[in-house]
Amino acid sequence: MRLPLGWLSVFSPLEALGVTERRPQAEGVRRLVRTLDALGLVVEGIEAAPAPSSGIVAARVCAIHRIEGADRIRLVEVDDGAHVLRRVVCGAWNFEVDDVVPLALPGTTLPTGVRIEARSMRGVRSDGMLCSPLEAGLGSDTGGLALLPRSLEPGQSVAEALGLDDEVVVDLAVEPNRPDASGVRGIARDLAARLRAPFADLEGTLEGEQVDDVTVEPGTAERLVLASVTLDDLTLDPRIARWLALAGVRSVSPIVDATNAVMLETGQPSHAYDRARLGGGIVGVRSARSGERLVTLDGRERVLAGGELVIVDGEDVVVGLAGIMGGRDTEVGAQTREVLLEVAAFVRERIAQASRRSGLRTEASWRFERGVDPSVLEAVARRVGQVVGCRTVRRVAEAGELPAPRRIRLRTTAVLRLSGDPVVLEALRPGAGLERLGFGLEPEEDGYVVTVPPWRPDVEGAADVVEEALRQVGYDAVASASLVGPHRDGPNQRQRRERLVSRLLSDRGAFEAWSVTLVDPAVESLLGSDREPAVLRNPLRPEESVLRTTVLAGLLGALDRSLRRRVEPVRLFELGPVFWRLGGEVIERERLGLLVGASHDGGTEAGRWLSDICARIGVALDTVVLRLGQGGTGWPRLHPGRCARLEVDDEVVGVVGELHPAVFRAGGVNPRWRYGYLELDALWLWNATSQVELRAPEVHQASELDLSFEVPWDVAASELAARIDDVLGGLVRDVGIFDDFSHDGRRFLGFRLRLAAAEGPVSDEQLHDAIDAARRAGEALGARLRSAPTS
Amino acid sequence: MRRERVMEAEGLGAASSIDALAGHVERVLAELEAVESSLDLARVREAAIGPTSLLATLSRSLRDLDPSQRSIVGRAVSDARRRVTDALERAGRRVREAELERQLQAERSDPTTGLVRSALDGTGARHLVARARMELEDVFWRLGFEVATGPEVEDEWHNFEALNVAEFHPARAAQDSFYLDVPASPPLLLRTHTSPAQIRLMRRGRLPIYAVVPGRVYRRDTPDARHTPAFHQIEALVVDEGISFAHLKGTIEAFTSAYFGPHIASRLRPAYFPFTEPSAEFEVTCTICGGQGCRTCSGTGWIELGGAGMVHERVLEAGGLDPTSVSGFAFGFGIDRLVQMRYGIADMRILPDNDVRLLWQTRGEA
């Protein structure tokens, strides 16, 4: 909310709030801003709005002349207090002889920054300019000249005559629980309480000639006040008009401006109807029936779903969306003679519901949703009349009772327990903070019974009262107490391993990615995890409308962008969740995805990274079953000839291989590298049993044994290696592949074994036996031993 | 052949053998002077002391000589051997040194070549957000907290109702949340904050709770420089007997100085959150200007970091706890914002973009 500080003076003298000089840099203003911050009314910006220049003076229109050959401008003779009439050319048409208007004398700079000089138009000299409210710094209207009270002396400075001072506008962020602070009244009350300044609340009742019957459906409004205002040459108080403009509200007409100004001043919205256009000259409140229609003030026809709160006239015709927006047909216009003012306290939830259903949020609905003060409705109606100079605002009807104030039991021990510092009790003393805010405190044996003022619907329990008390003494005043938690273990295994693995991958050259978990359904189906993805009901865009079922679906975006930017090879990893739908449930699992560019064979390259990960967390690969082929349901489809899956207890815990070429074809870019991909179930990764045990190395020299096999494509190298390791008993210390080539579709693998025995050097006989055993192991899998050293 | 040589030596007699030996030694010494390479040296060594050399032949023939001659010839042989081996050793050292020198002269490379490499080559890095998260976790471990997690797909009850955000609460406008098209009751959505994890921690049924929950959250904001639909928060929750607002202040201060350093202070000011009461916004000294006032902090010297407050009674109740016997506080803030502050990131959209050209610049960890 944009608050011109001068507006506070309606409720509390500015001097008492410490403001004497209205400049943003003035010490008093800066102190006030700090106080607002400390009260939780956060100041997000401060601007200067100096008073209109003294060169803008009141001038009485004495004569209006046509200018030959001009049909848009006229020559106006005005009395500006000098001996001779001043002649000014003017393009506005909303005034007549004897009106008093603002005149900018030559040499004056307007608030808009324009400098006025005498000049000629159509051969006629114009000795100054007559000003609109915007040009005179009086408001926001630009439709015509500002019409000043006729009582003003010609030649008098307008600012001085209207009592317009320099202003400072502060932009306040009002928390949604503080409906009272959405008006100057609430802000002033908070400030006055904290700064111990006097506070004069809004008061007044309506004069009533009769109380008509009015229909208010139960459960729609706590209170409703209808009042009538006769429009008879009304103008908005110039100070209020200026504050309204500085608050950023556009001028519409005096009466509508008045309802807007009083809404900003008190937080209470009201609506003005052209009474003549209301059937029966009266309105009531009820729930809308399905299919009812209404053209709102914004010109849109709305078909109601039913249940929204609507305002109906005496003939039950819908004339407005209660608390949100009025109807066009009953709008106040130029012909309006009498206005019916509706000031209500609607039921909060009903307004929130209707506002959401209609997708319409307004200044008024915002305030009603948060709760208004039902005790000031008459005073508000009266104030609306007052700011436009209407002396008699007559009561037309009234419905509803003032609800009983909320009472809260507050035990002193509970206050101390929650706040942790007795300083809070200062706000509970008689005449101190809470009472100054309007709370009633009746002492009891062990505390107080607190009566909550009607403008604070947010205060519901003891904790809310404690917050008010703390706000008054200041959060800064509470001494802090130190606290240390009982956990001494630091990271658990999952967290340690997560760091180990991430560190390994980043040290090896991969960058951690944070990709979007919302992906394109087309990408999902391309990767073919065969899981039903969880679809968003309200996505922002179709490319981000389903949750990924594989990490790859997220990483592909980054890969695609990299390729398009010609940044290769990419090495990316990501730890993050995947999701899939299972009936009415969405399953969520954490996974590790790793994408690595390789010059030759992406699948094998990904296998190397997998081996490193297992080594780093101390998991022996022989505890995992590695099988050639796709991962199946739940896993991204990889290059069919270059992929393998990891299984533990017949459950797939990961896939490794090369990205499917279709992925690139769909992306439309051709990579220069082949991309290896690894995706692992993080639960397995974090929980897999670590088998780090130290074995004293043998004292004897190890023997190396190179074995070359022809291995069919359907046998995994890792399986053959594991089998050889297995059949050679305790002799094998290490198996590596030193040679891998294929010819004519046949594949040849050279394994290098390092053999050692505890009892002594490996004998020739042991070597021979080992070779035989390896040959048989290979044959069992269909692999043929081609060569081995003879001795 | 062997036999003949021996006979020859015998035939020459002791004196002539010694002369021949002297000649052999002189020849060898002369040859060694000229030796330039280890190959030449090996050849000379073979000729000088190899099995077919005069020295070896004479040595072998010694046992066939009669004792009077044996000692004379024997001394001559061992003298000759010593001279030859000494010379060989000297020549060997000389040749090795010369060869090493030649090698060193010939071998050239420029180690700075290794410094000129593609930015994509070499080590990688963890994500900036992950790094900030790890630092935060480290701080909270030191403060005696556990690090917990919660699901990203939540239901409305955990995300809103249990946190005292009622159905028509203004904070719950549908346009801010991503809902899932799954027939579930309560409806499923992507969590809009890490706070539902509070409820899950409480419903675990183990007290006291001293925990932080870092994690990804989602808001249905159109991406712009300051918003991405997903970002990260960290949430601290303490529930124990006798926990007060003063403890909240103390813990935020302890966290602030542990994470940002002792020169950074924190302060609380009133705010509103449905799940806490009293509630506060917490601010820290502007890390850019150190509190002097700058553009980042709009001249105030303070930067708003996150929300805090005493856990609302209704939230404790939703968590299955008795508000008359325990109390608690919670605070939370955005991790991405910390990253943004530290690295001066103008546009948040670069974080999920994973542009490798940006990532490689983030290798260094200070």
Image (cartoon, rainbow, N blue to C red):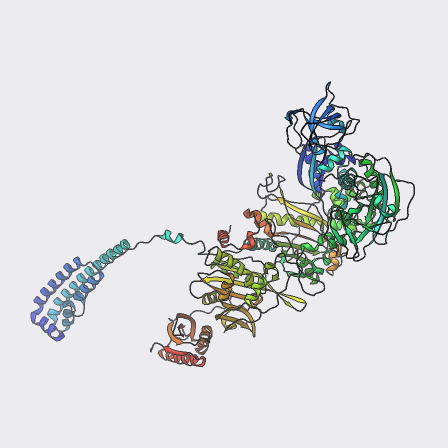
Left-right relation of A569 to A493: left
The residue positioned farthest toward the top in the image shown: A83
Residue B132 versus residue A169 in the image, above or below: below
Picture coordinates of residue A453 (x, y %)? Answer: 82, 45
Residue that appears at 58% across and 69% down: A530
One can see residue B350 in this view: yes
Foreground residue, A36 or A204? A204
Residue A97 versus residue A441 in the image, above or below: above
The residue positioned farthest toward the front in the image shown: A69
How many marks on residues?
A: 0
Picture coordinates of residue A537 (x, y %)? Answer: 66, 61
* Quadrant location of the C terminus of chain A in the rendered image: bottom left
Foreground residue, A678 or B183? B183
Left-right relation of A704 to A181: left
Picture coordinates of residue B228 (x, y %)? Answer: 60, 53
In which image quadrant can residue B47 be found?
Answer: bottom left
One can see residue A53 in this view: no
* Quadrant location of the N terminus of chain A in the rendered image: top right
Foreground residue, A184 or B40? A184
Picture coordinates of residue B285 (x, y %)? Answer: 61, 43
Residue that appears at 70% across and 65% down: B184
